[in-house]
C-alpha cells in the first residue's frame, strides 16, 4: 500500500525525514520444475491475471558453437527455422495464420544459445504449442527462405560500419576475444557464400534435440493440464543422442592490451572504449565487482557520470559495465563519446577513475548507496511471472543453483569497502587494458602517439566474391 | 468472432480512478497489486513544438535540468547558492555578449576566465546528483525522462512502501526547481546532439526530412535543437520556458501499481497542492499549410541506403485516427503484411520496410511515414516505386475482410499483453490522457479500430497517399567509400 509517513497532511522538509512502512509481503512465484523422459527440463507457473499463454525455449548451441569458416550458419538456422516453416506448415501460411490470430511464434540465436518463444491468447494455446513443436522438430529449411535470410545478413555486413557506436563495441569484442574465436568472429560475404542448405541441417541436427532444451511456460492455464500438453507435443520428440555442446574457452587478452585506433573521418565525436577481460557471475569476487561498478560508472550517481558528464560536460553517454558471463569470462568496459577536441582529455579522465578505484577505498556513503540500489529494489526481481520463469531457466541452462538469487543478495549485503578495493586491485586494470579510439585523429587534442604504441585497426569490409563465380 | 479480452479491458478500467487538484494538476491512479512495486509517470503537455527559432532545444534541455534538484534538493545552502548563480549568469552574459560583438581574443579570454571562476564558485554549493541518489537509495528503477515534439515525460518506479518519496521528489522539481549546473549540462546536450544526429546517418536523415516536409509548423525543428541555438541558450531562457509551460494544469501524473487511491490522493494534495495555480499558455498558432507539390532530397553519407517517404495527415483527435492505425498495421505488422511481402519477400529490394502514422508527433497534424532499409545491390528509386505501388493498391482495391480482422484482433492482443506491466500502462494512460484529454480512449480506440471498414481504409488512402502530399528523403552512399560493398 502506498505509504503515508507520520507527517500525513504536511510535506516533509527533507526526503531524508521520510519514514516508510515495511514492504508488503513479497510473494515470490515458485515455478514447478520437471524433467521429461526425453531430457527436456520444463518449468511451469500459473498466472491468471491475463488470458494469455507464453512459452520460452532455450537451446544449447548458439553462435559460439558454429564453425568459424561457416560464420553465419547459426543465425541462418535460427531465422529459417521460423520463416521456412515445416512440410505441413509452410512458412508463408504460418505467417498469415499467426498474424490473423494476433499471436507470435519466434525463433532466435545469440552467442550462447538458440531461443524460441510463443505468445498467444489463451484460446489459441493448443495451436501455439503445436506450431512450436512442429517448427522445432521438423524444420523444412527451404532454399528460398535461406536465400532471403542470407540477403538480410549481407545487408547487415554492408551496414556494419555506418554507425560509430556499432563499430566500436564490435571491434572491442573482436580485439578482446580474438577475431577468429568463438566469441569474436563475425560473418563475412565469403563465409555466407560457402554455406549450403546441408550446413544448416548439420548445425540443426547437432544442437536441436530435446536433451538440449529448457522450456518455460507461464500464463492462464492449470499446471497439470499444461504439463500434459507439453508432454504430448515437445515430449514426443525423440532424443538425438548428440553430446552436450562444450563451452568454448576464452584465452587471456593480456597480450592484446594497448592503444588501438579506427579512423572515421565523417564524425565530430570520438568514441572511446577502455576495457579488458572480466570474470564470471560465480566468481567469489563478483559481488564486490558488481557494487564496485555501480560506484565507478554503472548508475546516474556514479563517479564517471558525476565527474565526466555532469561536472566536466564531456560526454552524454559515459558509463562502465562489469558484464560477467555466466559460463565464460565477460568484459569490463568503460565507454563514452566526446567531441574530437576533448578526446584524450576524456580518455585520461576515464583511466583516472579506473585507477583511483584500485588505489583508494570507496566511501561509506558510496558503498551504502550502491548496496541500497541493489537491495532496496529487490521486489522488482519478482514483478513479473515471465521474469521469474526466465531466471529459473537461465540458472538451469548455466548450471547455477536455484537459490542463486538469494545467495547473490546475501553476498551483496556482505560486501565491504576492503572487499571492493581488493577486488579492484585484482581485477581492474587501467594500464593493462585495451584502449580503443574511433574518430578523426588529426583533430584530437593530442596526437595518439603520446599514448604509446598505436595499432591501427582496418575495418574495411572484405568484398564479396564476384557474382556468378560463387559455387552453387 | 468473440471480441477478444473485452472482460479484461472492462475489469482494468474499474481499477482506474482520477482526480484533479485545485491548481488543475490531474492524477490518474491504477491499482495493480501483483507485486509490491509502483510506477510513476509525469506527463507535461509541452514539447519541442512549443519552441521558437533561436531557442530550439530548450524543452529537451529543460528536461535535463529537471534532474538538478530544487531549493531543497541538490544544494548545500540555497540562499547562498542563489547569489552565486546570479553571479554566474552575469559573468556568462558578459562573456556571451563580448563574443557576439567580436571582442578581441584577449578580452574574450579574460571574460571566459571570469565566467569559469563564477561557474566554479556556484558549483561549490552543489550537492551533486542528489535527485538520482535519492531514487537509487530507495531501490528505484528505470529513472529517466524523454522529450518529443509533443510532450515531456518523467518517470521511475519504486518499491510501493516508498511511494511518498516520488511525491516529494517530483513535486519539488516542478514546484521550485533550481537550474543549477546549467552551462555544463548544455555541453552534455551538445554531445548528445553530436551522438544522435551529427554522428548518426539515420539521425541526420530524419532531421533533414522534417525540415523539408514542414515549412511553417514547429514540427520542422529538431527536438535536440540546432547547435547554434544550443550554444546560446541561457539559464533564464530555461527558467522562462519552465514558468510558461510547466503550469499545473499542463501536468498529468499517472500512478500504477501496489497503491490505494485514497492514500495517493492525500499525498498528491499535500505535495503537489503546494504548486500555485497558473494560467495555461497560449496554444500554438501556426498551422502547416497544405503541401503544394512533391518534395524530395538526397543525403550523400558514409552509409548504406535508407529511404523515407512521408505524407501529411491529421492529428490524433481526428475521427479517422483509427483508420490510420489500421493502415499502419496492414502495411507493416507481421510477415504477412503488405510491405514485408512485397518489398522484402517477393522483390527482395529491402531487408526491412514499414509504415506508421504519427511522426514526429500526434498532437498536431503529423506524417504517415514509410521507411525502408534498401537491400544491397538495389536502389532507393526501386524502393520508392514499390512503396508507391503499395499505396496505389490501397487506393484501388478494398482490403480483404481477413486482413482487416487480423488488424483488429492484433490490436486487442497487443494491448492485452501490455496490461501486465506497470510502467508501460502508466505511459499509455498518460499519453492518451495528454493527447486526447481522456485516458479511456486507450480502450475506446479498440472499439474505433473494430469499426473501421474496408471502405474507410480506401477513402483515407485516397486522400492521404497523393503525389502532392508526398515528401521523399534518402541516404545515398558517398561515391568513394572503400569499405562499403556495392
Image (cartoon, coloured by chain):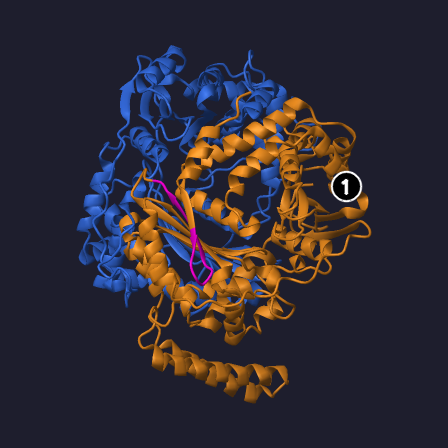
The shade of chain A is blue
Residue drawn 54% across and 35% down? A187
Label 1's element? Answer: helix
Quarter of the image with the C terminus of chain A in it: top right
The front one of A449 and B32 is: B32
Residue B11 falls within the magenta-colored stretch: no
Residue B216 relative to residue B172: left or right = right
Q: Could you say where residue A200 lies in the image, as x and y percent from the top left?
A: 52, 21
Residue A152 relative to residue A393: left or right = right
Q: Could you say where residue B232 lies in the image, as x and y percent from the top left?
A: 58, 74
Q: Could you say where residue A449 lies in the image, as x and y percent from the top left?
A: 48, 64
Q: Which range of residues does the magenta coloring cover?
A: B19-32
| Above or below for A355 versus A119 | below
Q: Which residue is mark 1?
A: B463
Q: Chain of mark 1?
A: B
The front one of B480 and B220 is: B220
| Above or below for A342 versus B196 | below
Residue drawn 71% across and 51% down? B480
| Above or below for B176 versus A326 | below
The shade of chain B is orange
Q: Could you say where residue B20 lies in the image, as x and y percent from the top left?
A: 44, 55
The front one of A76 and B469 is: B469
Quadrant in the rendering for residue A224:
top left
Amino acid at each position: 500500500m502506498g505509504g503515508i509517513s507520520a507527517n500525513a497532511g504536511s510535506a516533509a522538509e527533507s526526503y531524508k525525514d521520510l519514514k516508510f512502512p515495511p514492504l508488503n509481503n513479497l510473494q515470490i512465484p515458485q515455478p514447478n520444475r520437471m524433467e521429461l523422459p526425453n531430457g527436456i527440463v520444463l518449468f511451469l507457473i500459473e498466472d491468471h491475471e491475463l488470458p494469455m499463454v507464453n512459452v520460452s525455449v532455450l537451446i544449447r548451441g548458439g553462435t559460439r558453437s558454429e564453425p568459424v569458416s561457416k560464420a553465419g550458419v547459426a543465425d541462418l538456422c535460427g531465422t529459417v527455422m521460423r520463416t521456412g516453416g515445416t512440410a505441413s506448415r509452410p512458412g508463408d501460411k504460418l505467417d498469415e495464420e499467426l498474424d490473423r490470430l494476433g499471436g507470435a511464434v519466434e525463433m532466435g540465436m545469440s552467442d550462447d544459445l538458440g531461443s524460441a518463444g510463443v505468445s498467444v491468447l489463451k484460446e489459441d494455446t493448443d495451436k501455439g504449442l503445436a506450431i512450436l513443436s512442429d517448427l522445432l522438430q521438423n524444420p523444412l529449411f527451404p532454399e528460398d527462405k535461406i536465400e532471403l535470410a542470407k540477403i538480410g545478413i549481407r545487408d547487415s555486413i554492408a551496414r556494419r560500419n555506418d554507425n560509430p557506436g556499432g563499430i566500436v563495441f564490435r571491434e572491442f569484442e573482436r580485439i578482446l576475444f580474438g577475431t577468429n574465436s568463438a566469441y569474436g568472429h563475425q560473418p563475412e560475404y565469403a563465409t555466407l557464400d560457402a554455406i549450403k542448405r546441408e550446413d544448416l541441417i548439420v548445425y540443426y541436427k547437432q544442437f536441436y534435440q530435446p536433451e538440449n532444451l529448457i522450456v518455460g511456460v507461464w500464463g492462464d492455464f492449470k499446471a497439470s493440464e499444461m504439463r500434459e500438453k507439453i508432454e504430448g507435443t515437445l515430449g514426443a520428440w525423440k532424443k538425438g543422442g548428440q553430446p552436450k555442446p562444450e563451452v568454448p574457452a576464452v584465452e587471456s587478452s593480456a597480450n592484446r592490451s594497448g592503444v588501438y585506433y579506427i579512423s572515421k573521418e565523417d564524425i565530430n565525436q570520438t568514441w572511446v572504449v577502455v576495457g579488458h577481460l572480466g570474470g564470471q557471475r560465480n566468481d567469489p569476487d563478483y559481488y564486490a565487482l558488481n557494487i564496485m561498478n555501480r560506484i565507478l560508472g554503472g548508475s546516474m550517481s556514479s563517479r564517471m557520470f558525476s565527474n565526466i558528464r555532469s561536472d566536466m560536460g564531456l560526454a552524454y553517454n559515459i558509463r562502465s559495465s562489469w558484464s560477467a558471463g555466466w559460463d565464460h569470462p565477460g568484459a569490463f568496459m568503460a565507454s563514452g563519446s566526446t567531441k574530437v577536441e576533448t578526446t584524450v582529455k576524456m580518455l585520461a579522465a576515464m583511466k583516472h577513475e579506473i585507477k583511483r578505484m584500485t588505489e583508494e577505498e570507496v566511501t561509506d556513503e558510496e558503498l551504502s548507496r550502491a548496496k541500497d540500489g541493489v537491495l532496496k529494489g529487490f521486489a522488482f526481481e519478482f514483478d513479473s511471472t515471465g521474469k521469474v520463469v526466465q531466471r529459473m531457466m537461465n540458472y538451469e541452462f548455466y548450471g547455477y543453483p536455484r537459490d542463486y538469487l538469494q545467495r547473490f543478495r546475501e553476498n551483496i549485503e556482505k560486501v565491504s569497502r576492503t572487499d571492493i578495493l581488493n577486488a579492484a586491485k585484482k581485477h581492474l586494470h587501467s594500464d593493462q587494458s585495451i584502449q580503443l579510439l574511433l574518430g578523426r585523429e588529426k583533430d584530437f587534442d593530442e596526437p595518439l602517439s603520446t599514448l604509446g604504441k598505436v595499432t591501427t585497426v582496418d575495418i574495411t569490409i572484405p568484398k564479396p566474391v564476384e557474382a556468378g563465380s560463387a559455387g552453387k | 468472432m468473440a471480441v477478444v479480452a473485452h472482460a479484461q479491458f472492462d475489469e482494468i478500467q474499474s481499477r482506474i480512478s482520477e482526480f484533479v487538484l485545485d491548481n488543475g494538476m490531474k492524477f490518474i491512479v491504477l491499482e495493480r497489486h501483483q507485486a509490491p512495486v509502483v510506477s510513476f509517470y509525469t506527463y507535461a503537455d509541452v514539447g519541442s513544438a512549443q519552441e521558437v527559432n533561436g531557442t530550439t532545444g530548450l524543452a529537451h534541455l529543460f528536461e535535463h535540468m529537471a534532474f538538478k534538484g530544487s531549493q531543497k534538493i541538490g544544494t548545500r545552502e540555497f540562499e547562498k547558492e542563489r547569489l552565486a548563480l546570479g553571479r554566474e549568469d552575469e559573468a556568462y552574459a558578459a562573456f556571451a555578449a563580448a563574443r557576439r560583438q567580436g571582442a578581441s581574443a584577449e578580452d574574450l579570454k579574460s571574460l571566459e576566465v571570469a565566467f569559469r571562476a563564477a561557474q566554479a564558485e556556484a558549483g561549490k554549493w552543489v550537492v551533486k546528483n542528489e535527485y538520482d541518489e535519492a531514487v537509487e537509495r530507495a531501490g528505484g528503477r528505470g529513472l529517466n525522462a524523454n522529450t518529443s515534439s509533443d510532450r515531456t515525460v518523467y518517470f521511475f518506479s519504486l518499491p510501493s512502501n516508498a511511494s511518498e518519496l516520488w511525491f516529494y521528489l517530483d513535486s519539488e522539481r516542478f514546484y521550485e526547481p533550481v537550474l543549477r549546473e546549467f552551462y555544463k549540462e548544455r555541453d552534455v546536450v551538445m554531445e548528445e546532439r553530436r551522438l544522435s544526429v551529427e554522428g548518426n546517418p539515420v539521425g541526420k536523415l530524419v532531421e533533414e526530412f522534417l525540415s523539408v516536409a514542414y515549412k511553417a509548423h514547429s514540427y520542422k525543428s529538431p527536438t535536440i535543437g540546432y547547435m547554434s541555438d544550443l550554444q546560446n541558450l541561457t539559464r533564464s531562457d530555461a527558467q522562462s520556458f519552465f514558468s510558461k509551460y510547466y503550469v499545473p494544469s499542463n501536468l498529468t501524473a499517472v500512478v500504477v501499481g501496489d497503491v490505494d487511491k485514497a492514500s495517493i490522493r492525500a499525498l498528491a494534495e499535500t505535495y503537489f497542492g503546494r504548486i500555485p495555480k497558473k494560467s495555461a499558455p497560449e496554444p500554438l498558432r501556426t498551422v502547416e499549410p497544405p503541401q503544394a507539390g512533391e518534395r524530395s532530397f538526397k543525403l550523400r553519407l558514409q552509409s548504406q541506403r535508407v529511404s523515407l517517404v512521408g505524407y501529411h495527415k491529421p492529428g490524433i483527435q481526428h475521427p479517422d485516427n483509427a483508420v490510420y492505425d489500421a493502415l499502419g498495421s496492414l502495411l507493416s505488422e507481421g510477415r504477412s503484411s503488405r510491405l514485408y511481402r512485397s518489398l522484402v519477400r517477393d522483390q527482395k529490394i529491402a531487408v526491412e520496410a514499414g509504415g506508421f502514422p504519427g511522426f514526429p508527433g500526434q498532437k498536431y497534424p503529423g506524417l504517415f511515414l514509410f521507411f525502408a532499409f534498401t537491400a544491397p545491390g538495389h536502389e532507393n528509386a526501386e524502393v520508392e516505386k514499390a512503396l508507391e505501388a503499395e499505396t496505389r493498391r490501397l487506393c484501388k482495391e478494398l482490403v480483404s475482410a481477413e486482413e482487416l480482422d487480423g488488424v483488429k484482433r492484433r490490436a486487442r492482443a497487443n494491448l492485452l499483453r501490455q496490461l501486465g506491466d506497470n510502467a508501460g500502462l502508466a505511459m499509455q494512460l498518460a499519453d492518451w490522457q495528454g493527447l486526447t484529454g481522456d485516458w479511456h480512449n486507450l480502450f475506446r480506440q479498440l472499439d474505433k479500430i473494430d469499426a473501421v471498414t474496408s471502405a474507410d481504409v480506401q477513402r483515407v488512402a485516397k486522400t492521404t497517399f497523393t503525389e502532392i502530399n508526398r515528401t521523399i528523403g534518402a541516404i545515398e552512399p558517398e561515391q568513394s567509400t572503400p569499405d562499403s560493398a556495392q
